[in-house]
Each structure stands twice: as C-alpha cells, then as structure tokens.
Amino acid sequence: MTGAVVTALRSALGARVDTTTSALQAARADKSGHASAGMPLAVVRAASIPDVQAVMRIATDTRTPVVVQGALTGLAGGANAGPGEIALSLRDIDRLLEVRPDDLIAVVEPGILNGDLNAALAGHGLWWAPDPASRAISTVGGNIATGAGGLLCAKYGVVRDAVLGLDVVLADGRLLHLGHRSVKGVTGLDLTSLFIGSEGTLGVVVGATLRLRRLVPGEVRTLTASFPAVRAAAVASAAVTAAGIQPAIMELMDAASLAAVHALLALPAPAPGSAQLTIQTDGPAADLEAAAIAGVLRDAGGTVVVSHDAADGEHLLAVRRSMHPAMESLGTTLIEDVSVPRSALPAMFDEIARIEREHDVVIPTVVHAGDGNLHPNFVFDGPDVPDHIWAAADDLFRAALRLGGTLTGEHGIGVLKSRWLADELGDDQWQLQRQIKGVFDPLGILNPGKVFAP
Ligand SMILES: Cc1cc2nc3c(=O)[nH]c(=O)nc-3n(C[C@H](O)[C@H](O)[C@H](O)COP(=O)(O)OP(=O)(O)OC[C@H]3O[C@@H](n4cnc5c(N)ncnc54)[C@H](O)[C@@H]3O)c2cc1C
C-alpha cells in the first residue's frame, strides 16, 4: 500500500515528491526537540493549490495520513511527520498576491515567510502586526495554523486579530473560501477563526487575506528596569498594566535566563538573582507613556534606565531575543508556553519557585509580561524529555490552570501537550471539539495523533 501511495503521488506530482533519506529525516522534527517515531513515506513540496488538492484526494482515496508543514519552526511537534504519513510542505507556495493600502489588506500564499512579507509591505508603508520571534524563519501559514503571537502582540494583537479570510483545502480535496475582505462580516459561523490555531487538523491553509496596519513613523522609547528578585519584577509588570498604560512591548527575564543570555552574548554578568523588565513605548505618546511607566517601575522598587535611541533600544531587545539560542547552548530544551491573567504573574512565579524546589530543577523563564504569556524552559541532556522533567512540566501546567490560565498562549498543543488538553477543556468540550474535527476530517487523516489524540 505504501508503495502504491508513493506511485500515485509521483504520477500526479512528479519531481515534487521526495523520498530521499535526507528529506524524510528532515520532515520528522520541528524545533520542539521532539521527533516522530520514524521517517514518513514521502515529502511532497506542493507548488500550487491544485497540487495540494491532488495530494489530499490521493490521501483520502488511500486513507493515508497527511502532516502539513510550513517552515518546521513549531515548538509543539505539530508538524512532525512519521511512519506511513505524507509530509505536505507548503513552503514553495509563497507569493504575495495583492496589497491594498486603501483597504489595509494583503492576500498571500501560505509559504511566505513573515519577515519577507513585512519587508515587502514596508515599501507600501504597511505591516502585518503578528511578530513571533521566529518571524524571519516561520511561514504566515504556520503562524495562522498555530495562532502565533509575539513581542508586540500586547498592543497590536495576535494572528487571530489580523486575519480576515482564509482559503483552505479540505481532507477530500475541496477548496473553500472562508471569511471576507471587508472589515466587518458576520455571515454564518466564523470558520476563519476556527481554522486559526487548528494546527493542521482541520484542513490545509492555502491562502490568506490579512488585515494590515499603517507604519507610523515616530520615535520609540525603551526602558529597562532591574529588580533584586523575579517576583518584584512580576509585581511591577502587573502594576504597569493595572495603571492603564499600554506599552508596545513588555518582556520579563528571570535571573537564570538573564545569566544565560549574558553569558552567550559575552556581556558582564548580571547581579546574582536579579530579574529584568524590558519595555518599549511607541507612537505619538511614546515619551509620556515611558515617563509614566518609569514612575510605576521606580515605585515598585526597580532601577530604571530609559533609552531615547532606537538603535540602543534594539540592542536592549536583542538580549531578550537571544533567549532561544542561549537555552540551546545549555542542552536540549523543552520550551513551555503557559499563559495566566496578568495580575496572576507574581503568583505564577511563586509556583515556578515551588516546582523548582520540589522537582529539583532550574526553570529559566521569560515572559511576554504585557499579555501574561510565560515561556518556562526545561533544559536536559539527550534527545528525549526525561520523566522527571515531564513531572515538573505537568505540575507547571496544573498551576497555570489553577490560576485561571491556559496550557498554551501561542505555540499550540501539537504532540507535546495533547495529554493535558482534556484537563483544560473538560470532557464535554473535549468531545465536542473532536466531533468538530470529525466534520472536517471524517477519515481522521489530517495530522492524526496531534492535539486531539485520545
Ligand atoms: C527561535 C524561535 C522563536 C519562536 N518564537 C515564537 C514567538 O515569539 N511566538 C510564537 O507564537 N511562536 C514562536 N515560535 C514557534 C514557531 O515559530 C511558530 O509556531 C510558527 O508559527 C510556526 O510556523 P512554521 O511555518 O514553522 O510552521 P510549522 O512548524 O511547519 O507548523 C506548525 C503547525 O502548523 C501546521 N501548519 C503549518 N502550515 C500550515 C498550513 N498552511 N495549513 C494548515 N496547517 C499548517 C502544522 O501542521 C503544525 O501543526 C518560535 C520558534 C523558534 C524556533
């Protein structure tokens, strides 16, 4: 059967079907540090929507599972393709089809990189706001399928706020156009939103109509504030939110992450135990907001430095953006992604300190403090997550849920968190969500074993 599937793919798609060992190995793993159990049966690099439809028709006829792949930068194992599966790459369908500065929309193909899209939009005085730290290397299709966020999302919104419509190919090969080009639109159920964050389990995103913003030239102000301990930094960030001031970026780094990044970048070591907030304001009120935030941070016990120089600001943010390579330099990393209400950040850091003590682990943590999204990192040796790390992660997930939070703010459930999904959703909603997947994918061939795994 496997041979027959590859033969059918080759006769429909020719050289776009790759069965070389290097291609099959590469398709097994995203950047989560987790790989599938073995090699998929083929990698198909689709070049057009009809290519995608042909793959899905063959998959339906032969009951063959399909794993959709963008740039494989995901951190939940959602794009990992394994034995008996077709890895369907959208990376080569990557054109910017239309830009409408008057309507503030762009129509794109899914394989375009977020960074390339924004470089092209800048020429029109426009930008697409979702800014994952992986923006230079991740696709817009992948951003949509994971519901990605980023540093600027506290002020400018996440993917869900920036997509008006989607073109999707269903499991049986039908092409659907969801959503609209107008700003408003409430016709029928909101299937566009349903596909955002669906992680390749409902259909293949083959096009998107994006909601854009105008680039507003102007100054940015960047502040850093040091605190003697991470709890104080968390209290200060919650105080900024409670004061009703809206920074564009508000990032928190705990002592372990700050020390790791300083070591990687060969910067002077930070004071032991100290944590840091890095905050940026922008727009016409940048100065006033920076001054107000500085006041809140000083009142909260922070040592504050304000930079008026944009290049200096970028340099300060580069420290935060170096977190991922800093963790990679220490060992294999499980990057977690829990989110809590912003007022609960201090309590969440109390929980992290407890988990570190009780499980005898260090959990370097960075936070998109502007929206309460924490990235606690577990670092270990070897390719597989050891049991004691999963036990600590399990404790972390349950702590976030107790505080009114969620398992994942932006990376998705993928393969790594599916066993906790029902804990957050409850049995009734979990069953309902599985039934909804069944409507779109009755044969269960789209990304089986991910998200809704039993
Ligand atoms: C250094 C680094 C920094 C990161 N920073 C952030 C961050 O700040 N914010 C954030 O949100 N994420 C971040 N990520 C995670 C990752 O980059 C995002 O999840 C990104 O959106 C994945 O895009 P991708 O093209 O690599 O998708 P992939 O990894 O290839 O796929 C991700 C999921 O989407 C599905 N999928 C992909 N394309 C399609 C499609 N066209 N149709 C249907 N399903 C599809 C896949 O099946 C899979 O389930 C980071 C990753 C790295 C390595």
Image (cartoon, grey):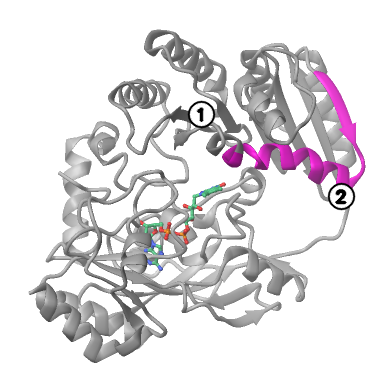
**Crowd tier of the residue under label 2, counting other residues whose Cα lies within 10 Å: few below 14, some 14–19, many 20 or above:** few
**Residue lying furthest left in this view?**
1
Whether residue 194 is visible, yes or no, is yes
Name the residue type under label 1: Pro
Q: Residue 326 at x, y = what percent?
A: 61, 36
State the SS at label 1: loop
Query: Whole-percent x and y of residue 8?
Result: 17, 85
Looking at the image, residue 346 sits to the left or right of residue 385; the answer is right
In the rendered view, tell whether residue 345 sits above or below residue 73: above
Residue in the foreground of this view, choosing between 19 and 9:
19
The picture places residue 401, in percent across and down from the top left corner, at: 37, 26
- Label of residue 265 in the image: none
Q: Which residue is mark 2?
A: 284
Front residue of 346/451: it is 451
The quadrant of the rendering that contains the N terminus is bottom left
Q: With 307 as the anchor, is 381 left or right in this view?
A: left
Mark 2 residue element: loop
Choose top left, top right, bottom left or bottom right for residue 431: top left
**Which residue does the image show at 34% across and 53% down from the upper left?**
78
Q: Give the residues drawn in magenta, as a range.
A: 303-325
Q: Residue placed farthest to the front in the image?
A: 21
**Residue 427 drawn above or below residue 276:** below
**293 left or right, relative to 54:** right
Q: Position of residue 390 (x, y in %)?
A: 32, 27
- In the rendered image, the quadrant that contains the C terminus is top left
Q: Is residue 385 left or right of residue 345?
A: left
Lower sequence index among marks 2 and 1: 2
Residue annotated with mark 1: 341
Q: Is residue 21 magenta?
A: no
Task: Name which residue type carries label 2.
Answer: Pro
